[in-house]
Image (cartoon, rainbow, N blue to C red):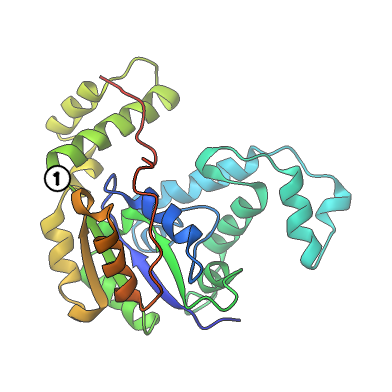
Amino acid sequence: MTQANFLFCVGAQKAGTTWLYSYFAAHPQVHVQPIKEIHYFNVLWDSKQIGFRRMREKHLASFPPLPKSVLTLTGRFARGARSILATERGDGGLYEDSRRLVEMYASEEPDHAAYRRLMLDGAADKPWVADITPDYSVLGGRRYRQMSDAFPGSKFLYLMRDPVQRMWSHLKMRAEWMCAHVRPGITAGDVLQKVLEGRERHILDRSNYRGTLFALGQLPADRVKYMFYETMFANDAIAGLCRFLGVDFHPGNYNHRVRGGVEVS
């Protein structure tokens, strides 16, 4: 198994993390999992974020039962056969990808063994594996130090965006989710009103650049990189990121807007 180093991209949400995931997925020296946001450390250390685990479990349970002939397969053919029969359903991913995430959450192995196993699966000889989970932005300095200690050689990346633009994008995304899962007709303005009333606190938490910057500042400076949404879609910015990781520069598709979201007024 490869001894790849870990890159933790800790956000910010709605600041280009999905574009970055797509860029890394195409980079020959960086490995990512089929599902972008792993939600490992936030579920592990913050009981308020257990909902991410439950969402994965619910998604896995939504698949129709697989034939016994597939369930009993073992070895290198098993994953491919199960994935062929699975249907991709948005961010939830294929059956096998979801199953592996749920298995990771349930593991009680020490030293993050199940997480390491999942992240390194398929990495071959690539020098980096990337976990791009914006919800890590609220973990705090003590947790970042624990991650750094547990994964020697790891590095951290934090993307930022104009706070008003980031907030508005987040409000639209939340409104879209609530229309699908709560009731139709909810607008970004409705969500903003909830924020102003002290509800939807997670939106403000993920807007707290100062808190995340302070927490990341507790790590060695050479292991942290900061980038800005407004300037990251250019060769100079991505070349700097590649230098930070010590990998070859490959230009990105800077004109491709990933998950711009629907317009929700």
Corner quadrant of residue 219: bottom left
Residue 36: where, in percent of width, then height? 46, 53
Residue 149: where, in percent of width, then height? 33, 83
Q: Quadrant of the C terminus?
A: top left
Residue 139 appears in the figure: no
Please, is residue 161 above or below residue 159 in the view? above
Q: Residue at x 50, y 46 (%)?
A: 54
Task: From the viewer's perspective, tell me whether residue 33 is left or right of residue 262.
Answer: right
Corner quadrant of residue 188: top left
Q: Residue at x 50, y 62 (%)?
A: 32
Q: Which residue is mark 1?
A: 162
Dot 1 falls on a residue whose secondary structure is loop
Camera-nearest residue between 232 and 162: 232
Please, is residue 117 above or below residue 97 in the view? below
Q: Residue at x 31, y 49 (%)?
A: 16
Amino acid type for the residue under numbered disc 1 = Asp
Camera-nearest residue between 82 and 183: 82
Residue 182 appears in the figure: yes
Corner quadrant of residue 21: bottom left
Q: Quadrant of the N terminus?
A: bottom right
Residue 12: where, in percent of width, then height? 26, 52
Q: Residue at x 64, y 37 (%)?
A: 62
